[in-house]
Amino acid sequence: MRCPFCKEDDDRVIDSRASEGGSSIRRRRECQRCGRRYTTYEHVEDAVKLLVIKRDGLRVPYDRERMREGIRRAAFKRPISSERIDQIVDEVEEWLVVNHEKEVSSQTIGERISSVLRRVDPVAYVRFASVYRRFQDVGEFIEEARDLKERSAADIPGQQDLFEENDSGSVKRDA
Ligand SMILES: [Zn+2]
C-alpha cells in the first residue's frame, strides 16, 4: 500500500481488525521508509481476493463456495442448519481477511474451520479435522475420536469424497 506521506510502497501492517459490523477491514500500517503510520480500509469483498497456498505450494484464489462445501460435507446428517453453516463460513472468512492480507495456507484455513466446528458439533469437527490433521497428527485425531465416543470418521458416508475434494492433490489417501 502506497504511503500517503512519502509515496513509497513499502509498508508493514501493525494491526488489522474488522469494522462497520464486519463489512470492512481496517488496517493500521507503518511505512518502512519514512516510519509514519496510516490507516487503510478495505471492503471485505476486495479483501477476500486472498490467495490460498496449497500443500503442494500452488497458489489459487480463495474460494468461499469451496469452503462452504467442505463444511457442508462435514455436517452431513448432523443437526446443523444451512443458516448455521453460512454463519460459520462468515466467521471463518472474517478471521481470514482480518489476519491475512495477501495469502494464507490451506492448512491455516482448515485449522480455523476445525476450531470453529469444534464448538458447534463434535462429529462434524472430527470429520473435518481428520482431513487436515491426519498427516501431521494422526495420534491426536485418534485420541480425539476416542474421547468423543463417536463413530470413526472412516465409517461415515461421504468421508472419502471429503478427502478427495479437499485441497491437497498431492496427498495419498492411504498414506
Ligand atoms: Zn512513507
Image (cartoon, rainbow, N blue to C red):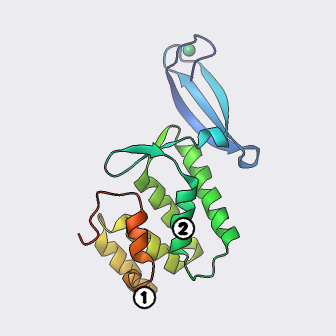
Mark nearest the camera among 1 and 2 is 2
**x and y, in percent, of residue 147 in the image:** 42, 84
Q: CA distance from mark 1 to mark 2?
A: 18 Å
Q: On residue 151, which mark appears?
A: 1
Q: Residue furthest right?
A: 20
Q: Nearer the viewer, residue 167 or 152?
A: 167
**Residue 47 appears left or right of 140:** right
Q: Are marks 1 and 2 in contact (CB under 8 Å)?
A: no
**Residue 26 appears left or right of 136:** right
| Amino acid on which the number 2 mark rests in the picture | Ile
| Amino acid on which the number 1 mark rests in the picture | Arg
Q: Residue furthest left?
A: 175
Quadrant in the picture for the N terminus:
top right
In this view, 127 is above or below 172: below
Neighbours of disc 2 within 10 Å: few (<14), some (14-19), many (20+): many
Q: Secondary structure at mark 1?
A: loop
Choose top left, top right, bottom left or bottom right for residue 146. bottom left
The answer to which of marks 1 and 2 sits earlier in the sequence is 2
Q: Residue at x 33, y 57 (%)?
A: 169
Q: Which residue is mark 2?
A: 71
Q: Is residue 17 visible?
A: yes
- Ligand 1 lies in quarter: top right
Q: Nearer the viewer, residue 35 or 87?
A: 87
In this view, 169 is above or below 83: above
